């Protein structure tokens, strides 16, 4: 998948680009402003863009996302201002609120990649809030409202009370995130 990163925090943008490149995606950017983003896209196409809301010199990522959308680029806000993003559901497919981990971004990319290939997915990745573009601005909801799965408590052969799957697997997920190289640095920068 071809992905453009529009993020005015250069180091954060580079770390995100590295994480996505490491799993085989072609990444354009990071771009810190509208002009840089459009220049990156002048000779290439992108399938997906991660767009920060506040860009360099006070430029609006919201307006840039609208412009990219008119060019056929699917946008996701990656921002520390989720409330502002929710006010503009027409500009992007959804949002990832900062702080986020590389694992979250990777799962979001996989989600959009699966959708673009025509797969019907049962759930939205954790950390991604999709916008319902049929609703009015400011009235956004999460698409995944399913109850958490219940699994037996994991223990060394000792049965225990049932607990949410998220609790049962959270330790393993944290270990997987730590294996992503600069995940701790990226998380520190986004938070």
Image (spheres, rainbow, N blue to C red):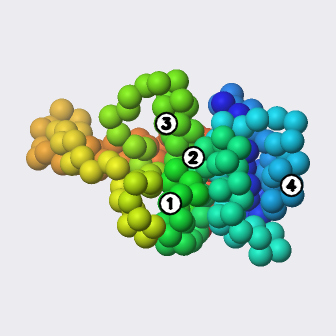
Is residue 99 in sight in this rendering?
A: no
Closest to the observer, 15 or 177: 15
Cβ–Cβ under 8 Å for marks 4 and 3: no
Residue 18, quarter of picture:
top right
| Crowding near the residue tagged with mark 2, few <14, some 14–19, many ≥20 C-alpha atoms within 10 Å | many
Is residue 176 in sight in this rendering?
A: yes
Q: Of discs 4 and 3, which sits in the foreground? A: 4
Compute the Cα span from label 1 to label 4.
24 Å
Q: What label sits on residue 107 in the rendered view?
A: none
Q: What label sits on residue 111 in the rendered view?
A: 3
**SS of the residue at dot 4?**
helix
Residue underneath mark 1: 89
84 vs 125, left or right, is: right
| Mark sitting earlier along the chain (4/2) | 4
Q: What label sits on residue 105 in the rendered view?
A: 2
Closest to the observer, 66 or 13: 66
| Mark sitting earlier along the chain (3/1) | 1
Residue underneath mark 4: 36
């Amino acid at each position: 998948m071809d992905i453009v990163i529009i993020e005015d925090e250069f180091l954060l943008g580079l770390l995100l680009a590295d994480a996505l490149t490491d799993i085989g995606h072609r990444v354009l950017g990071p771009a810190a402003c509208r002009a840089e983003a459009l220049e990156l896209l002048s000779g290439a196409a992108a399938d997906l863009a991660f767009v920060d809301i506040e860009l360099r010199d006070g430029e609006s990522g919201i307006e840039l996302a609208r412009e990219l959308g008119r060019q056929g680029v699917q946008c996701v806000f990656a921002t520390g201002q989720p409330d502002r993003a929710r006010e503009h559901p027409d500009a992007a497919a959804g949002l990832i609120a900062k702080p986020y981990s590389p694992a979250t971004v990777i799962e979001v990319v996989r989600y959009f990649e699966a959708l673009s290939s025509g797969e019907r997915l049962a759930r939205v990745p954790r950390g991604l809030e999709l916008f319902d573009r049929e609703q009015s601005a400011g009235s956004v909801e999460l698409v995944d409202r399913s109850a958490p799965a219940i699994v037996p408590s994991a223990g060394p052969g000792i049965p225990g009370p049932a607990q949410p799957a998220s609790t049962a697997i959270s330790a393993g997920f944290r270990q997987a995130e730590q294996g992503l190289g600069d995940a701790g640095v990226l998380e520190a920068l986004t938070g």
